[in-house]
């Protein structure tokens, strides 16, 4: 019996926009970062790769955030520049009802971050993957890197199933295969969330991209749902459009197409599909997260001045 579960992870750079903070914005932006971690706790985040920008608040601050997080921070190649010791666990292992998932994190680093040093991401990733490859069913490399380093990781590191890349402005709606690794890019600055749907039955069969099948299923569902809006309770679409031959043919075609694609996906042992979701005003905040934002976000200064003048 197959089970379904959803896990929220972050590939890096969610806390700050840049690897540095202007002095006059330091307190405000640190409060924003605290709000993000508190929200991630509420959303039951499973693991966060520490990206270069996430270190902008300096060493003590990232350690404070890690202490307050209910999920692990990972990075296989981020060090304390003074002690030369690694600051985070290189990987995290997540147990699901029927799979074991391994998440490894690396970042490219930035010379402006004077409190931190960064070892070679390729060597660090390979070492961490070698440690967990026999313990997990799937390996996810969370890579906070540029284009050149992405190519090096996919070409040189063995054992990656999915590379989840942050630090990229490009959104790839359809994941691409490179050197046997599926590369996922979901853009930057939290403009999109990527829902990666994976069906993994065995460790032998090749992973198949079923994006086109899921797109056709979604199209069929949307058309059928649109025709069902004025449906009387207890009536089927076929009964409602009994006197409309063209509609009946359309309904039959959509149902057949939907079933064909569902059956094809089920016939594949291992498959994946990425659904990018734009995080715009159409996404409604949960009350719990909205309360966190209100508690942490500084009051709008222009509004405060206006209120003060009106008193």
Image: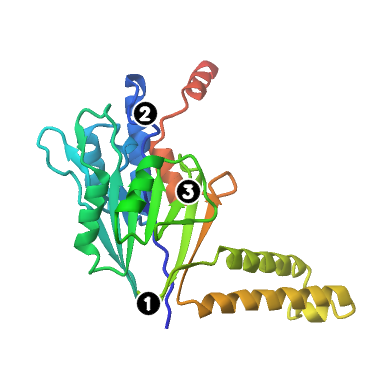
Q: In the current view of this chain or complex, which residue is farthest to the bottom? A: 1
Dot 3 lies on which element?
A: loop
Q: Which residue is mark 2?
A: 28
Residue 56 in the figure: left or right of residue 287: left
Q: Nearer the viewer, mark 2 or mark 3?
A: 3
Crowding around mark 3 (Cα neighbors within 10 Å: few <14, some 14 to 19, many 20+) is: many
Tell me which numbered mark, 1 or 2, is placed earlier along the sequence.
2
Q: Are marks 3 and 1 in contact (CB under 8 Å)?
A: no
Tell me which numbered mark, 2 or 3, is placed earlier along the sequence.
2
Q: Residue at x 30, y 57 (%)?
A: 103
Relative to the observer, which residue lies in front, 104 or 98? 104
Rendered view: 204 above or below 198: below
Residue 227 is situated, as x and y percent measured from the top left of the image, at: 77, 68
Can residue 214 be seen in the rendering of this structure? Answer: yes
Q: Residue at x 38, y 41 (%)?
A: 148
Residue 186, numbered label: 3
Residue 142 is situated, as x and y percent measured from the top left of the image, at: 34, 51
Dot 2 lies on which element?
A: helix
Q: Nearer the viewer, mark 1 or mark 2?
A: 1
Tell me which numbered mark, 3 or 1, is placed earlier along the sequence.
3
Can residue 75 be seen in the rendering of this structure? Answer: no
Q: Which residue is mark 1?
A: 202
Q: CA distance from mark 1 to mark 2?
A: 48 Å
Rendered view: 60 above or below 263: above
Q: CA distance from mark 2 to mark 3?
A: 27 Å
């Amino acid at each position: 019996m197959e089970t379904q579960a959803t896990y929220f992870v972050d590939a890096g750079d969610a806390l700050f926009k840049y690897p540095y903070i202007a002095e006059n914005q330091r307190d405000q932006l640190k409060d924003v970062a605290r709000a993000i971690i508190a929200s991630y706790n509420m959303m039951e985040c499973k693991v966060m790769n520490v990206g270069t920008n996430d270190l902008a608040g300096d060493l003590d601050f990232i350690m404070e955030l890690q202490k307050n997080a209910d999920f692990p921070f990972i990075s296989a190649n981020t060090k304390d520049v003074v002690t030369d010791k690694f600051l985070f666990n290189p990987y995290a292992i997540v147990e699901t009802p029927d799979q074991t998932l391994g998440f490894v994190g690396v970042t490219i680093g930035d010379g402006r971050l004077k409190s931190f040093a960064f070892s070679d991401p390729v060597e660090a990733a390979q070492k961490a993957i070698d440690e967990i490859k026999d313990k997990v069913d799937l390996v996810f490399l969370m890579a906070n890197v540029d284009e050149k380093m992405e190519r090096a990781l996919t070409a040189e590191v063995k054992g990656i199933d999915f590379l989840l890349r942050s630090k990229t402005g490009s959104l790839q709606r359809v994941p691409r295969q490179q050197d046997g690794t599926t590369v996922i890019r979901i853009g930057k600055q939290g403009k999109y969330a990527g829902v990666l749907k994976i069906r993994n039955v065995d460790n032998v069969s090749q992973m198949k991209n079923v994006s086109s099948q899921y797109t056709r299923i979604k199209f069929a569902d949307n058309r059928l749902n649109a025709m069902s809006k004025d449906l009387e309770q207890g009536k089927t679409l076929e009964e409602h459009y009994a006197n409309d031959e063209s509609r009946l043919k359309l309904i039959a075609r959509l149902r057949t197409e939907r079933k064909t694609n569902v059956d094809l996906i089920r016939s594949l042992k291992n498959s994946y599909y990425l659904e990018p979701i734009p995080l715009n005003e159409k996404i409604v905040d949960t009350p719990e997260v909205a309360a966190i934002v209100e508690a942490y976000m500084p009051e709008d200064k222009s509004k405060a001045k206006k209120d003060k003048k009106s008193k």
